Amino acid sequence: METSEPNGTSAPPEIAALSIKAGATFSAKCSIYSANVTVSADSNLEQGLKSATKKDLPKSFPFEMVFFSKEEHDKQTQDEADNAGFGSVFRGHQGLCPRLGGEYPARLFIGQSTDQTTGMSCHMSGRFIPTVERGSIDLANVHVSKWNKELLCVGGFLARMAYDFEMREVRDAWSKLSKADAEALALYTMKSFVFHRTTPDSNVSHIIKDAFFACSTTKKILFISDQGIRPTKDIRRSHGDFDPFMRTPVVRKDLDPLLKSMQFPDCLKVKQYQLSDIAKELESLSLPEAVMVAFLRWWSTSCGRLDISPERRTEWRSKFLKVGRAEWQGKEVKLSSISKFIDKPMLDIRGQEDPLPGDAIPPALIRGVELSKISDTLGWEKMTIAHWLRYLKGGIVDPAHDITKAPEFAQRVLSVLSALWQTLDENSRSEVREILQDVPCIPTTISNVPSMKRPRDAYFPYVDIFRNLPVVKQQLPVESITEQVLQYLGVQKRCDIDALIKQLNSDDRWNVMDLARYLGKSPQEDVTRVMDKTFFPCSDGKRHYITKVFTSTATNRALGLPVVKCDSWNSNSEEAICLTRQGLREYPTIEELITIASSESDGSARQAAWLSLCGPSYETELGRHFDPSKFLSHAFIPGVRDGQPCQFFHHEVC
């Protein structure tokens, strides 16, 4: 068989145009695909055909097929609507312009139209041998049937050539047309070559269809996809799990009926996604962040449902992770380098800008992935706090995230560590301490001058009695778990007791409340040693034992008692309670009050002492313990004698 390209000519005017009524003219343009058929038959077939037809076989003859473009099809449809009252040779049951979908079907011609339909939207004309009635072709007689079937195969070959040509035309015009117009043109072309059931002989469409699909040796046929016209081998069926991360052209779900009606054989069918498609996609380019998120979410969710063995599942995972790459914050993340992921406890507290080790997957790439499945489905381990700290210790981060030089970031790291502390076992805590023990990662201040210190070289604020130690910065919350963490790392909560006592005795740059704060967190043996010394500064400018000093209340100061020297006094503070428990006196005794009340040197102190004795605080004590005989020489009761203020002895008062 010899073939030719479509000649693109219209049917002859006397056929293509017919005046039905004055002023009503109908015309149609069509493409005619033709093939020159050369006859070569064995003697048996030749004799059988000659006996049936009473004619010799031709040496060659043309075989033609008529195809109407979408533009012409739409025009004829509109003309029919506009001229509904007029007949037309192009429309109707015997019309030359068939409709899509089998209505007004295309027919076989043997010089004239037969009743035999072709099953698609293209007329065919050739040297078919008809039945006696000439309404159909003969597929009953052995020799005639063989001849007619061979011609139907030629029709299938020609139809395939026309389909491929028309679809290539659509493919080439795709970028020049609007999406809607391009899709409409492609759909029209494909629907023109959908094989419907033929009448009166249903075998005709099967023979043409089989030849249509079998004539190609390339195993390729063009079809519409969301990315234009592609060979079916390069297209996949749309699937909600894969579409978000695959760039492979797909057939939209609404085109599934058309795809089914095309009746592609297995070798030409549009296939479902294969795991090899995914591996090819991952290898072909570095995926955008959202696309990689979709892939990882799919794999972690679906890998367990794949109908493959666990061994094959592991092999495919290895292939995916070997070639997968993603773009994240201007950098390329290779899945082959990933072995860690951030679990929920750390994920909830870390900052988005916190640096990550190169072997940890950025959290943004596993959004929506069920974290509990990652280890099983992707083979990654949870990133431990120790792993992160070891990475930060390496000093390969930018200056803003250098824990030895950026106090704010170092504080953040310690806060993260504190938040996770209760979840760490002893081995993990010990590992953290080993990592940080020689790293100057503790933000401190020395006399308000910032500095970074190793844990063992830093002190808690309450230790800095003399304002000369590197203490943990106040911006770092030194309380509860954080203090426990810092202490475990080695931050000092007390200094050498001998050195402390020596400096307390010789240095005036300390406050008794600071000392109390420190002693409140010290061992009792250290507290006892300090309390046994006479270096507690008092209001009288001297140093006393703690048991000889009074609290700095307004009453005690008014009495002229030696009160502890401090900036302010709050009897309910922890420091005040600590000092009073260690012997700091809150009130004078009755004897001391009477001694002050009988003093001749300080009138205001005498008055304050007398008011205290008469107050509710001493009323019960006086009733129980006051012995006048002990104070015979003390004139402590204020009065008036001869019009002048004076002090009376107890026995002088009635």
Image: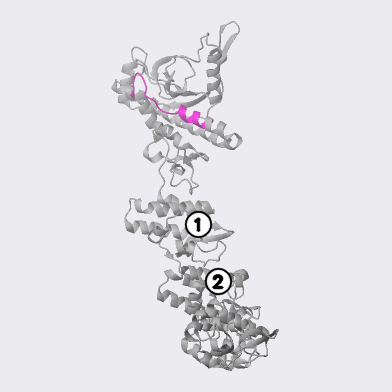
User: Which is closer to the viewer, label 1 or label 2?
Assistant: 2
Q: In the image, is residue 346 above or below residue 457?
A: above
N-terminal-most mark, 1 or 2: 1
Relative placement, left or right, of 407 versus 2 is right
Q: Answer whether labels 1 and 2 touch (C-beta < 8 Å).
A: no
**Within 10 Å of the Cα at label 2, are there few (<14), some (14-19), or many (20+) other Cα atoms?**
some
Residue 203 is tagged as none
- Residue 538 seen in the current view: no
In the rendered structure, which segment of residues is drawn in magenta? 185-202
- In the displayed orientation, state which residue is furthest to the right: 643
Quadrant position of the C terminus in the picture = bottom right
Residue tagged 2: 477
Q: In the image, is residue 492 above or below residue 228?
A: below
Q: Residue 641, how many percent across, how many down?
A: 67, 86
**Within 10 Å of the Cα at label 1, are there few (<14), some (14-19), or many (20+) other Cα atoms?**
many
Q: Secondary structure at mark 2?
A: loop
Q: Residue 157, how many percent across, how many down?
A: 43, 31
Could you tell me the amino acid type at mark 2? Pro
Q: State the residue at coordinates (47%, 20%).
A: 98
Residue 365 is tagged as 1
Could you tell me the amino acid type at mark 1? Leu
Q: Can residue 224 be found in the magenta stretch?
A: no
Q: Nearer the viewer, residue 432 or 550?
A: 550
- Residue 418 seen in the current view: yes
How many badges with numbers are in the image?
Answer: 2
Q: State the residue at coordinates (36%, 56%).
A: 313
